[in-house]
């Protein structure tokens, strides 16, 4: 055999060894980490901090501070205390973990999401907290995130990803210097395909960790007397796609909803049969809404700012259903006014993956105002706008007729009339608003609008 | 000896080209990409004299053979350096004064921090649309709306500057890898928007970038920014 052929065979063998070496353990590990009937202990006792882990810890500590400094953390004592109470109730008594300080925080973000940093900071977004129905559902989310911290998932995944990245880079180098001929072509094919396989195993590993967090979360819920089947309700809730944003990709880092429901139901089995009086209490919707009402109002504003008008309507409607004769009417009016010519719900056709991708592309090209103008040029858009402006006007009026009327309802009416070109009425409402709220932070903005309205002919 | 024709088909051709390209990029001076001005700035109907700079959002990563790693502390440093450089260049070359930003850097009450955060988010939402068609800034197409007045800035503030930047620094191993195999070198890419403090319109958009270590290349940063603001008309000295 010639020297060149021997060299080529060595290179091919090296490629195969690198690919299998990084892929196989992860693939085999999938079965080991999360069987349905036996979950691992709550804490990964054998975990030892290495240099890479400590570097990561430093990064996440800085990230924590950055969230705070940048005004992304909701600074509402009552909401944070509520979250803290739930979080601490779920942590096994007497548990202390190296380099973990538990913090439970609400992130001012309208996207429904929750995540855990490996230093023990658990974040739940206002967008997610506004969608859930009771304390148990929130506990399910926190229990899931707590598992990520307790089982050191972020560190484990980081370690695993580093090995895989190294493999990919070595493969790329081998591919770039592959010899000519059939052997070279074979090496190039292997090195071109290998990254896709490696990336697939990264997502696969991530899905395994999510599965482990789901199952361990159930154990923690039962220990803290939360009805465990609420974990399944939360999964279904997360799959609700109000804005048409959940675009399915080839790979997902979380298991598919039906798969999650299946293994959770299988794991729950007889565990869900035992119901305590405390579990029933934790399922109470009214108690949750009472505690979360101010946070949810804050979220409606964030949803509107982010152009997530359908979510704003949905959340504001939930608020009105819970507490009708209140400021909540103003928030629903705001949501309908800003929804403008858009439909309140997406059609089934609009919720297909292809349609969602097209909508996302359009959204990237056009501003909200341009999208609105386009919709207003259609019959359906005009009908929607007519209906929504009537609804918002009624709601603003109702908000002003409550026991505790809010001055901002006059501002909302002013904006509505200005858009409808009813300048005199708009002026009157703006003036009323400034009279009732002379120290409002948007005083200058409204004053400027009044001046503009006065300048333009009636 | 290798003839030019045989070199064209040799196995060393591809790595050689990649190596030359990487060297050229690494040694290249600051590269400023296009700048786009709102018509009222281009026609000098609006003059920018005083600005405030909102905290820059910079994300620098260390790219190693084992993948990218966060550099949170270094990103903070670069962020402060970019803000200062923008302020110094605008003052020196365009007579634009930078005033203090209320509620920035975490001080002030929660409401003030929320306001700043919400405006930063508004710019982040608009940025992909600007980047998709940067030349439309010249048509005055982009605005973040009159909510900008809710910041209650000093009346003398003409514009608000938003800075975003992404960059990477390479480890020794990755530098060698890039030279041998190819890949992105160390760089810092910025997106800078100037928003009218009274109407919310995007007055200027520029996206300067440079090749080099973003954590140390101070001169390249300065040169890239100087080129980035080249078209902005200078304010007259008062």
Image (cartoon, coloured by chain):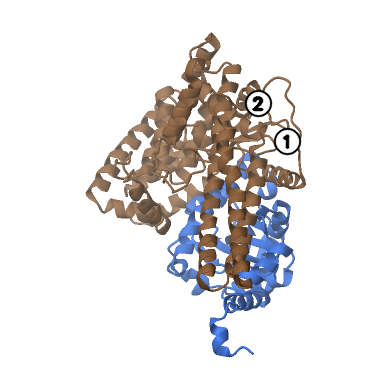
Chain colours: A brown, B blue
Using the image, determine if residue A106 lies above or below residue A325: below
Chain of the residue where label 2 is placed in the rendered structure? A
Q: Nearer the viewer, residue A203 or B191?
A: A203
Does residue A157 appear in the picture of this structure?
Answer: yes
Q: Nearer the viewer, residue A189 or A436?
A: A189
Using the image, determine if residue A443 lies above or below residue A91: below
Using the image, determine if residue A247 lies above or below residue A106: below
Q: Nearer the viewer, residue B185 or A338?
A: B185
In this rendering, position of residue A450 left or right of residue B64: left
Q: Quadrant of the N terminus of chain A?
A: bottom right
Residue A64 quadrant: top right
Labels 2 and 1: the sequence-earlier one: 2
Does residue A429 appear in the picture of this structure?
Answer: no
Assign a secondary structure to mark 2.
Answer: loop
Residue drawn at 22 percent across, 49 percent down: A379
Residue drawn at 77 percent across, 47 percent down: A51
CA distance for labels 2 and 1 = 13 Å
Q: Which residue is mark 1?
A: A47
Disc sitting over residue A41 in the figure: 2
Residue with the most extreme front position: A1
Assign a secondary structure to mark 1.
Answer: loop
Residue A346 location, x and y as percent? 32, 41
Residue A312 location, x and y as percent? 42, 38
């Amino acid at each position: 055999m010639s020297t060149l052929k021997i060299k080529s065979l060595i290179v091919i063998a090296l490629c195969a060894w690198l690919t299998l070496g990084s892929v196989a353990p992860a693939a085999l590990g999938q079965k080991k980490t999360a069987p349905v009937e036996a979950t691992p202990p709550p804490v990964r006792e054998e975990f030892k901090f290495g240099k890479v882990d400590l570097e990561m810890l430093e990064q996440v500590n800085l990230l924590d501070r950055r969230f705070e400094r940048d005004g992304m953390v909701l600074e509402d004592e009552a909401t944070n205390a509520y979250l803290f109470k739930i979080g601490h109730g779920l942590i096994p008594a007497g548990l202390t973990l190296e380099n973990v300080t538990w913090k439970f925080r609400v992130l001012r973000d309208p996207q429904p999401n929750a995540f855990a940093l490996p230093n023990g900071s658990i974040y739940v977004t206002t967008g997610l907290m506004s969608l859930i129905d009771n304390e148990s559902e929130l506990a399910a989310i926190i229990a899931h995130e707590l598992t990520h911290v307790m089982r050191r998932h972020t560190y484990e995944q980081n370690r695993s990803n580093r090995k895989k990245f190294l493999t990919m880079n070595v493969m790329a180098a081998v591919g770039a210097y592959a010899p000519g001929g059939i052997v070279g072509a074979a090496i190039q094919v292997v090195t071109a395909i290998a990254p896709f396989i490696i990336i697939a195993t990264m997502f696969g590993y991530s899905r395994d960790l999510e599965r482990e967090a789901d199952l361990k979360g159930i154990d923690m819920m039962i220990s803290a007397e939360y009805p465990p089947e609420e974990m399944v309700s939360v999964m279904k809730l997360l799959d609700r796609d109000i804005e048409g944003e959940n675009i399915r990709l080839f790979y997902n880092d979380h298991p598919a909803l039906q798969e999650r429901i299946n293994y959770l139901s299988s794991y729950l089995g007889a565990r869900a049969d035992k119901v305590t009086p405390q579990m029933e209490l934790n399922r109470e919707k009214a108690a949750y809404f009472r505690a979360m009402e101010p946070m949810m109002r804050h979220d409606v504003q964030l949803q509107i700012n982010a152009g997530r008008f359908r979510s704003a309507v949905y959340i504001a409607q939930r608020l009105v259903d819970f507490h009708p004769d209140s400021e909540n009417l103003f928030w629903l009016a705001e949501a309908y006014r800003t929804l403008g010519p858009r439909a309140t719900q997406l059609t089934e056709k609009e919720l297909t993956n292809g349609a969602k991708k097209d909508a996302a592309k359009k959204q990237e090209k056009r501003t909200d105002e341009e999208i609105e103008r386009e919709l207003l040029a259609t019959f359906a858009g005009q009908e929607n706008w007519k209906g929504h402006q009537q609804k918002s006007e009624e709601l603003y009026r109702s908000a002003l007729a409550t026991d505790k009327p809010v001055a901002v309802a006059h501002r909302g009416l002013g904006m509505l009339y200005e858009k409808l070109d009813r300048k005199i009425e708009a002026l009157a409402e703006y003036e009323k608003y400034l009279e009732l709220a002379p120290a409002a932070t948007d005083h200058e903005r409204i004053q400027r609008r009044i001046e503009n309205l006065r300048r333009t002919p009636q | 000896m290798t003839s030019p024709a045989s070199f064209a088909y040799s196995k060393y051709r591809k790595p050689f080209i990649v190596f030359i390209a990487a060297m050229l990029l690494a040694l290249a001076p600051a590269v400023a990409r296009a700048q786009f001005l709102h018509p009222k700035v281009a026609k000098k109907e609006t003059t920018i004299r005083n600005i405030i700079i909102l905290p820059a959002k910079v994300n620098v990563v260390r790219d190693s053979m084992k993948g990218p790693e966060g550099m949170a502390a270094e990103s903070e440093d670069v962020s402060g350096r970019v803000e200062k450089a923008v302020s110094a260049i605008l003052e020196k070359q365009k007579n634009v004064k930078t005033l203090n930003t209320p509620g920035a850097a975490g001080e002030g009450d929660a409401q003030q921090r929320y306001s700043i955060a919400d405006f930063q988010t508004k710019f982040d939402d608009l940025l992909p649309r600007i980047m998709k068609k940067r030349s439309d800034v010249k048509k005055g197409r982009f605005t973040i709306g009159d909510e900008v007045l809710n910041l209650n800035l000093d009346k003398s503030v003409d514009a608000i500057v938003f800075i975003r930047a992404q960059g990477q620094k390479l480890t020794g191993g990755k530098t060698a890898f890039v030279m041998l195999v190819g890949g992105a070198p160390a760089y810092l890419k910025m997106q800078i928007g100037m928003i009218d403090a009274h109407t919310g319109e995007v007055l200027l958009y520029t996206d300067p970038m440079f090749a080099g270590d973003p954590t140390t290349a101070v001169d390249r940063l300065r040169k890239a920014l100087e080129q980035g603001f080249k078209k902005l008309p200078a304010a007259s000295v008062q």
